[in-house]
Amino acid sequence: DAKTTQPNSMESNEEEPVHLPCNHSTISGTDYIHWYRQLPSQGPEYVIHGLTSNVNNRMASLAIAEDRKSSTLILHRATLRDAAVYYCILRDGFGDMRFGAGTRLTVKP
Amino acid sequence: GAVVSQHPSWVICKSGTSVKIECRSLDFQATTMFWYRQFPKQSLMLMATSNEGSKATYEQGVEKDKFLINHASLTLSTLTVTSAHPEDSSFYICSAFFGGHEQYFGPGTRLTVT
């Protein structure tokens, strides 16, 4: 499986933008880039996904490098409710989904 | 949107007993469901893929005789931890796809074996 590398932890101030990086240098042409987040004692929830082009939704934006070897999840205005572990996952089409270590985001008021 | 539920949300059992965890898809049919396990401060680990009407596919290192998976209908998959031991204490999470790219996760079941 293609692997991803994320920083263990990041901190942000409330109402400021947050950029969460992910490296995936061994990504294949059919791998989609997915982001999920997990709040304490809950199941993960979908954030966003993309293949080649940048993507936006109501939760976040996903910026994908031109060579697709890295991507960045952007939370435009962090809130305390955004404090969670964020997982960047590569998924080949509709195959199963395997989680890496993720980035623990702390949001300071 | 689609919702996946799990029951129970938490359970405490004695060592040597068996525990059944249910995973239901409430809005859509799911031909495939996934079971994950998560130890404290660790990431999710895929245990098995549950296929409706056929045998589950287990990940390497996961004992299929210990973690029995049954996917009897398009809306229900069950995970039974047989002869549970304290080292089986963990957070068990199921998930399902409903035709798109988004995977829906259940809220998880916390198992404590004493």
Image (tube, grey):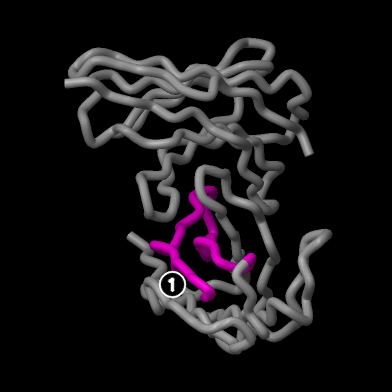
Q: Residue furthest right?
A: B60
Question: On the picture, is B35 further left or further right than A25?
Answer: left
Q: Residue B80 placed where, x, y %?
A: 61, 82
Question: On the picture, is A41 further left or further right than B55?
Answer: left
| The magenta stretch spans residue B90 | yes
Quadrant housing the C terminus of chain A: top left
Q: Residue furthest front?
A: B114
Can residue B75 be seen here? The reply is no
Which residue shows up at 37% across the image and 36% down it?
A: A84
Q: Badge 1: how crowded within 10 Å, few (<14), some, or many (20+)?
A: some
Above/below status of A89 relative to B72: above
Q: Residue A34 placed where, x, y %?
A: 54, 36
Residue A12 or residue B23, whichever sits in front: A12
Q: Residue B1 placed where, x, y %?
A: 33, 60
Above/below status of B35 relative to B84: above
Which residue shows up at 30% across the image and 16% down it?
A: A12
Can residue A108 be seen here? The reply is yes
Q: Residue A24 placed where, x, y %?
A: 68, 22
Which residue shows up at 54% across the image and 72% down it?
A: B30
Q: Amino acid at mark 1?
A: Phe
Residue at disc 1, secondary structure: loop
* Residue at mark 1: B28
The part of the chain drawn in magenta is B87-114
Question: On the picture, is A27 further left or further right than A44?
Answer: right
Above/below status of B84 relative to A30: below
Residue B106 or residue A109, whichever sits in front: A109
Which residue shows up at 49% across the image and 28% down it?
A: A103
| The magenta stretch spans residue A49 | no
Quadrant housing the N terminus of chain A: top right
Residue A31 or residue A74, whichever sits in front: A74
- Occupied quadrant, residue A18: top left
